[in-house]
Amino acid sequence: PFVKVRFVNTEELRRFDPELVSFFNINTPEDLAGAECLQEKLSTSQT
């Protein structure tokens, strides 16, 4: 099947996500723990 792809450079992505946390893999329990820690950090910094 045909998939339309658009590459986004880092500068463009930083306009919407300055910390570049939008895209990362969660493949292991350690990755999940890191994602949960990041979520907590971001949640407390917004309140």
Image (cartoon, grey):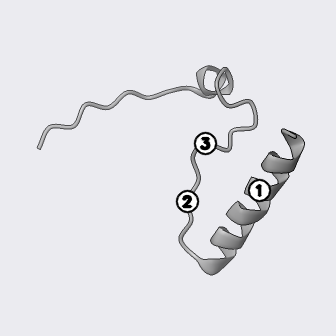
In this rendering, which labeled residue sits more in front, label 2 or label 1? 1
Q: Are marks 2 and 1 in contact (CB under 8 Å)?
A: no
User: Considering the numbered disc 2 on the image, is that residue within a helix, a strand or a loop?
Assistant: loop
Residue under label 1, please give it. Answer: 38
Q: Looking at numbered disc 3 in the image, what kind of residue is underneath it?
A: Ser
Residue 14: x percent and y percent?
Answer: 68, 26
* Viewer-closest of 42 and 26: 42
Distance of label 1 from label 3 (alpha carbons):
11 Å
| Residue ID at (21%, 37%) | 3
Looking at the picture, does residue 39 appear above or below residue 22? below
Residue lying farthest bottom?
A: 29
User: Where on the picture, by quarter, is residue 35?
Assistant: bottom right
User: Considering the numbered disc 3 on the image, is that residue within a helix, a strand or a loop?
Assistant: loop
Residue under label 2, please give it. Answer: 25
Residue 27: x percent and y percent?
Answer: 53, 71
| Residue ID at (56%, 65%) | 26
Residue under label 3, please give it. Answer: 22
Mark carried by residue 28: none
| Residue ID at (59%, 53%) | 24
Count the marks: 3
Q: Are marks 1 and 3 in contact (CB under 8 Å)?
A: no
- Judge left or right: residue 3 versus residue 14: left
* Viewer-closest of 43 and 25: 43
